[in-house]
Image (cartoon, rainbow, N blue to C red):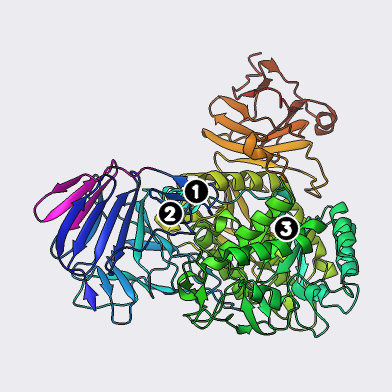
Amino acid sequence: MEVSSKLLQAEQHSHYLDLTTDAAKYRIYLMNDHIVRIRCTFDEQFDDEASYALAMTAWDDKMDGMIEDRRRVEALPAQVEDLGHSLLLRTAQLRIIVHKQPFAIGITDLQGRVLHEDLKERPHVKDNHGRLYHYSCLNDADHYYGFGEKSGYLNKKKRRLRMHNVDTIGYDSEHTDPLYKHIPFYIKFNGETQAATGLFYHNSHDSVFDMGCERSGYWNKYSYFCADGGELDLFFMYGPDIKDVIRHYTDLTGKTIMPTRYSLGYMGSTMYYTELDRDADKAILNFVDKCKAEGIPCDGFFMSSGYTTGEDGKRYVFNWNHDRFPDPRAFIAQMREKGVALAPNIKPGMLLTHPLYAKFDKADAYVKDAAGDKSETDRYWGGQASFVDFTSPAGRQLWKEHLKSSFIELGVTSIWNDNNEYEINNPDALCAFEGEKKEISAVRPIMPNLMAQMAKEAIAEAAPNTRPYIVNRAGFAGIQRYAQTWAGDNNTSWHSLKFNVPVMLGMGLSGVANQGCDIGGFFGPAPEPELFVRWVQNGIFQPRFSIHSCNTDNTVTEPWMYPSYTKYIREAIRLRYQLVPYFYSLLHEASVEGSPVMRPMVYEFQNDPRTWEESFDFMLGGSILVANVLEQGAKTRSVYLPQGSEWINWYTRERHAGGQTIELDVSLDSIPMFLRSGAIVPLAPGLQNIQNDRVEELRLLIEPSENASFVLYEDDGVTNNYKTGDYLKTTIQVESGRETTLSFRREGTYASSVQSVVIELLCKEIAPVQVMLQGRKLPMFLDPQVWAAAEEGWYYDLELRTAKIKYGSGVEADDKVGVRFDVKDLISI
């Protein structure tokens, strides 16, 4: 075993510091004032820089030509002060202390508060099996969030978590570990200092995080990271807020790709239809027509892999079964006419009996055996298979060619990447790694990222300027740059409904803003009616909203499967469609800032201790608190409303002070939601299909009791023209007071379809006395029906205590609405 215990030498370079200890070498980069890279190797020298994951670097990297939009920054000067017992590096926000003996690295803020501290006497260790350890001091006030896709409660303190992509069909969302994603990043939040920091281990070997499970009385309390190989390549990020840490992490690994707008619609799916012996295409088309007949909006369909079934009953990627889909091109065109995008299921494992197997094998497109002589084979769905090597230029090229010919040239620009965990059991199987060879154990979780990247590139090559919609089951850090994800093959149970919520919240805290889970449950018997209703009511708030199933009782999960309950399903999905402008704006924010869409309460209210352990209630953006009913047979629902804000019931407009728990009566149609004071929520009433309908009326739900702002984002939703300025960003600013001002400042060239704006202004104490638009007085109406027939004006809804203001959209100019709340003295008049 090798342990760094004593600093032997320090060598200062212009933009990094090299350290040599009695066991390992270190290189420290000050990436900026908030991000520090600490690289450690126990080998004679560092490996060459070769990262598929990083979106921001301060050095030459062999993958620079492969990673689109990688940003090169200049690290801060590595100026070192020798304090005798330690070395000191500074940024404008941090102090990095290198203790000489015993060797350890600590990081503090400007006030000297400890943000990170290695465990002295065994900070970095290499054991006799080649495993690498990094030990960090643990504080009783620490909370740990993130870690990617992980089961259980939001706070992972006292958990041991394994990083390893695996196909976990029917998993337990409270206990099963690992799941499908491998994201070695976490956020540490200290309740005493109110400081949040992040640690990202840039290492794609299998690894383990122990967040205080292990304990030894000979040491201070500690956590550790252990990787099976590679280097200890650590990026430290300082907040001090949790949202700052996520912004810095997504600076490093990339922001969420701007999605197609239709991806926010209801995406139908089931394995059942594509397993029909014949005419599966008609079953799917009938499903779309049935949605319309039932008044249920639908914008897409995830097509399960039964469409690829060969004569032997096996699934062969790129193969269309013509008994089930006689004319794929015509079928795709019919779906498109109905406003429904088709996303075919695609798998990277190719069975040995695949008609294209020999072609890929001859091209050296598969992961090789340990000797590098022949293609590695392993268990897969349907038998022995080889796996496409996406670190091979030949593998990538051949894969893209077949994506184009089998799908994109037929009109498909939505790709569903499934079963891409790369469960190759031989750790020594070889990948091309751009010609330099690397064991699969070193790059396995990167393969699904590259698979998604190839789908993105293939669409760009075959359908120029078409915005891709890619969905991935597996992934590594940075998967958000390419794909939407989902939480795999969940079990059908109340337990899954509940604990899938923190699974997704943890993903959002790990940079993956666009994700969801299979609504209704994937694996198990059909959900009972109450469970199905509650799952849909929860699912409408997930960025990916898809009802999908592989029911074990010969049934299919459909929106109308229980006719007497369909009204609840319809109402929930229609609420989802109303929220599309809000969702789309939040996803734009994620593409710029890295912000999650579904946000744990601690993300927005980290100063409120009551939020630190909350795993099930969440914020949708910054304005809406969602407290779904997650318990069977519930008649009441307790909701904690965080301090620092006032909370308004979405339906009744009843107001509640923050910092208290309230009890709600609930029925089967209840979807408990609360608006936060200062909320600004854009809505699209009546939207039925995102692709074919034009949003001509924009409704803005605004709570004006405090100053606030929100950026409403619009573009065409399907092209990449937004990258060259064809977008419309409307910054909605609220200045609160007796004379409240709503200002609308626009940026961009996109011609919005909005023709009229309706502002629903929630009034706290009194009704307005006057409403002005661009300095002119708007007419006031007493009769809501007369107001509805007018082109502009306002009236006051006394029951909901809401002023409803209507006018034609000023999309060619900035708007300003003034609302006066003076008390009108009728007696003195």
- Classify residue 74 by image quadrant: top left
Which residues fall within the magenta stretch? 74-99
**In this rendering, would 574 be left or right of 376?**
right
What quarter of the picture does the C terminus occupy?
top right
Q: Is residue 487 magenta?
A: no
Do we see residue 116 in this rendering?
Answer: no
- Image disc number at residue 414: 3
Look at mark 2 in the image and give the residue it sits on.
61
Which is more toward the observer, 433 or 379? Answer: 433
Inspect the image, locate mark 1, and give the three-letter code of the amino acid beneath it. Answer: Arg
First in sequence, mark 3 or 2: give its number. 2
Please state the horizontal and vertical placement of residue 329, each as a whole percent of the image: 87, 60
Q: Is mark 1 in CB contact (under 8 Å) with mark 2?
A: yes
Query: At numbered mark 2, what does the secondary structure look like: helix, strand or loop?
Result: loop
First in sequence, mark 1 or 3: give its number. 1
Q: Is mark 3 in CB contact (under 8 Å) with mark 2?
A: no
**In this rendering, would 766 be left or right of 507?**
right
Q: For the point 54% across and 41% down, which residue is it?
A: 677
Which is more toward the observer, 58 or 782? Answer: 58
Q: Is residue 754 above or below residue 448?
A: above
